[in-house]
Amino acid sequence: MVNILTIKKFNFYTIEQYLVSDKFYIPEYQREYSWEKDAQVKDFWLDLVDLVENNRESHFFGQVVIHDDIEEKKKYVIDGQQRSSTSIIFLAVVRQLFDELYTQTKKEGALNKFEDIRLKIMGRWSEEENELRFHLGKIDNLFFRDFIQRGIPLVEEPTEASHIRIKEAYDFLYEQLSFELENLDNTQKYERLVEFYNGFKDKFNVMCVETDDMNEAFIIFETLNARGKKLETSDLLKNHLFRTSANLIEEVKNEWLKMQEKAEGLDLTKYIRTFWNSRHDFVRERDLYKNLKDTIKTPSDCLSFTKDLVESIEIYKMLIDPENENYFNDKDIEIIISNLKTLNASTYYPIMLAMNVKFQESEIKKVITSIESFIVRNCVIAGRVANRYEMLFAKIAKNIFINNSSYEDIIKSLKTELVTDDEFENYFSVATIKSVPVAKFILRRICNYQQREMIVNPSNMEIHLEHIMPKKIGDWKVHEDVHQKYLNRLGNLTLLADEYNKSIKNKVFEKKKEVYKNSKIEMTKKLCSYREWTITTIEERQKELFDVAKVVWPDLKTT
């Protein structure tokens, strides 16, 4: 048991209050920076977007356990290192953007906020004095200090795994926040940036516990991070449903078991969250149980909810595994869903669950076709993170369920966020695709439009991606920098079928053309018309591919 007398401080602080309250150190035995940009950092960003967009009063960011070492006269962060480090990284991004705004506009407010972050939150540093407020462990300290806290540009890319994660976190947050400022005038940019800055520093809260006894610090840490197996949200929900269903307990149990049997090993928590987001306000997984518990309060609520879960499980299974599940009579719908699976798209699932209740297949087909265009244009080609549209798709789904939105309404809502034709062309002209399945899909769809009488084999196992300028330079007379820049450009990629021959993959262009001329794929055979393969050729071919792509994935129309 923790001795209450050894707890020096226990309070809730805003993230700014915590960061400016003292100097903090990470003990040497703690692990280095470990948050991944596509997991924890992305969650951090989505929490902030949710807070700002919905004007929430606060967000609980987690706990921080501090050991006040009396002998060393240092305060060590025993728990909370990763969220503290990421907070500093985000503030470094905000500092950079305020600096850029000041350079462009000479607006004093931007300069003041730049200085507030640099001096008040980060702290001073020079060869003579070190007044930085946050100090990482030995592996990360110098890199974090110079790149993040001091804002010194990198001379070369980091090689240490944790340094790479730090840079990726910074780059991800810079990209996301910069996107929020796109297409705004300077006054609007400043106001929007202040909105995110104030939202984070004033509304992200931490629970801070400080003790001067090392043993007690670890007891607190272990208590707050219990080692017992965490119950899944689906287990918690099941318990709540059974506990609340009273005289309907047997019926609720039967419906739950039906759903569980049909799920056949699916992640029930993910399914329930998807179902919930198809009918209610968007919720993240960690808040799902609370929202469900607050909404489902009566026996009839429990029965209705479990019946609806049973009703929607079949379409969800098809979304998860379109290759092996049959659901729609119109197989074109399932083909498009397979396409979206290839593109790793899943955030649109709530829309499909909501439409399933009220829409004809002909209307569903129009919507899913529009979603494919949306994902290809915005995510695959423009490079926007698919998860940023998760709230948009959930909002559309809720409007279907609550307000009986038509398929035209859905497409209009998608169109508001769709990249324009001009933007699509600009992004496409320099599009690089490193994912082999995605590159095959894009080229195959373009190819099928060009030669409609013969469809290219849809199996990624039977069709091969060919880099015209090959992965290994070999005898090609091309500079290494140019090779790296243009290797995965769409204009440098094509498809090969039965004529695929590993022996030619690194040959010069003249030798490759001997194989291309026998190709059944028109796109590949056409390569023989080029006398040489250069940067200019790649760029010209990419423009030609765009002329087809804009027809295959057009601007969204409701008719």
Image (cartoon, rainbow, N blue to C red):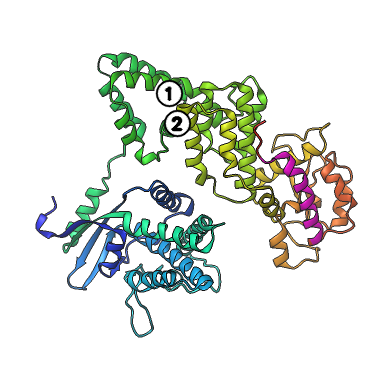
- Residue 139 placement: quadrant: bottom left
Mark 2 residue element: helix
Which of the numbered marks, if any, corresponds to residue 271?
2
Which of the numbered marks, if any, corresponds to residue 309?
1
Q: Position of residue 43 (x, y in %)?
A: 42, 49
Q: Position of residue 285 (x, y in %)?
A: 39, 39
Residue type indicated by callout 2: Tyr
Q: Nearer the viewer, residue 235 or 310?
A: 310
Q: Is residue 188 above or below residue 362?
A: below
**Residue lying at 22% horizontally and 63% vertically, measured from the top left:** 67
Q: Position of residue 341 (x, y in %)?
A: 59, 36
Q: Label 2: few (<14), some or many (≥20) within 10 Å?
A: many
Q: Which residues are magenta?
A: 536-555
Sequence-wise, which precedes: disc 2 or disc 1? 2
Residue at mark 2 to residue at mark 1: CA–CA distance? 9 Å
**Residue lying at 26% horizontally and 14% vertically, measured from the top left:** 247
Q: Residue furthest left?
A: 5
Mark 2–mark 1 CB contact (< 8 Å)? yes
Q: Can the viewer see residue 464?
A: no
Q: Is residue 549 above or below residue 351?
A: below
Q: Nearer the viewer, residue 152 or 222?
A: 152
Q: Position of residue 281 (x, y in %)?
A: 41, 36
Q: Can the viewer see residue 30?
A: yes
**Residue lying at 21% horizontally and 73% vertically, measured from the top left:** 73
Q: Label 1: few (<14), some or many (≥20) within 10 Å?
A: many
Main SS of the magenta segment? helix
Residue type indicated by callout 1: Leu
Quarter of the image with the C terminus is top right
Examine the structure image and report whether residue 538 is included in the region drawn in magenta.
yes
Tell how many labels: 2
